[in-house]
Image (spheres, rainbow, N blue to C red):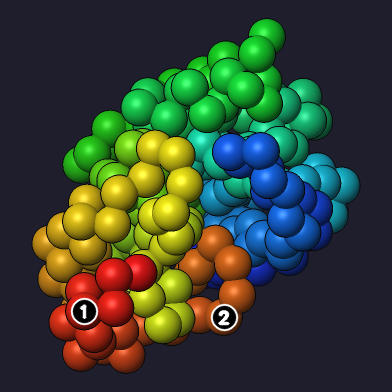
Amino acid sequence: MAGAVRVNKIVTSGTFSLDGGTWDVDNNVWVVGDDDEVIIIDAAHDGAPIIAGVDGRRVVAIVCTHGHDDHIDAAAELRGATAAPIWLHPTDRMLWDVVHPSVAPDHELTDGQTMTVGGVELQVVHTPGHSPGSTCLYGPALGVVFSGDTLFAGGPGATGRSYSDFATIIESIRTRLLTLPLDTVVHTGHGDDTSIGAEAPHLDEWIARGH
């Protein structure tokens, strides 16, 4: 028996750069799987602790929730170490190419597709706004959604930089995420977990404040 599918969080540290600025950031990397195989969600900063978290299991896929450099900078390293394919939504390819100009993702994420690990299905949910290709992964059987930088504890991801749009991220959250069961745990790209039920009542507040 391969055991139940479980979710492990690995926090890596580095920088995020865009529009001429650079900031120190801590990123959440999610390793989802059973005793035999895993999916890595986001390839942030440093491959070594992520590979350690994989702990010898087969990596089915390296899924990038979006193309910002702090979520993809270790992708090539992880692919080299695990031979797993990299998945990215095609509308974030321009962000990817800045970081990895000579390395292409292996596959394009598409809204509605499913990925399976340890017999559990993860559904790909395209949620543009933070970036054009921002994508979440929803695991109905696990009661979790991996939100990347689309939804955090306290509101939407940032939309004040290139390729982002506040109205678009609000529409994505309203129609694609807040429609999930209220007890769905939100595993974010940075910071603490939240839940759909904790965030849903605050949508109008976010709209009013504009971020």
Residue nearest the observer in this picture, 31 or 134: 134
Few, some or many residues within 10 Å of mark 1 (<14, 14–19, 20+): few
In the rendered view, would you say 41 is above or below 170?
A: above
Q: Percent position (x, y) of residue 83?
A: 69, 25
Q: Count every numbered label the image shows and give the total.
A: 2
**Residue 208: which numbered mark, if any?**
1
Sequence-first tag of 2 and 1: 2
Q: Quadrant of residue 155?
A: bottom left
Q: Residue at (80%, 53%) from the top-left corner?
A: 14
Q: Who's the residue at 28% across and 32% down the image?
A: 110
Residue 159 visible, this orientation: yes
Q: Is residue 186 above or below residue 74?
A: below
Amino acid type indicated by mark 2: Asp
On the rendered structure, is 116 left or right of 63? left
Residue count near mark 2 (Cα–Cα under 10 Å), binned few <14, some 14–19, many ≥20: few
Secondary structure found at label 2 = loop
Residue at image point 68% right, 9% down: 102
| Residue 183, image quadrant | bottom left
At mark 1, the secondary structure is helix
Residue corresponding to mark 2: 192
The label on residue 178 is none
Report the residue that reaches farthest toward the top. 102
x and y percentages locating residue 211 in the rendered image: 35, 69
Q: Front-most of 90 and 47? A: 90
Residue 172 visible to the viewer: no
- Nearer the observer, 67 or 166: 166
Task: Look at the image and tell me in which quarter the N terminus lies.
Answer: bottom right
Looking at the image, residue 87 sits to the left or right of residue 55; the answer is left
Q: Is residue 114 above or below residue 88?
A: below
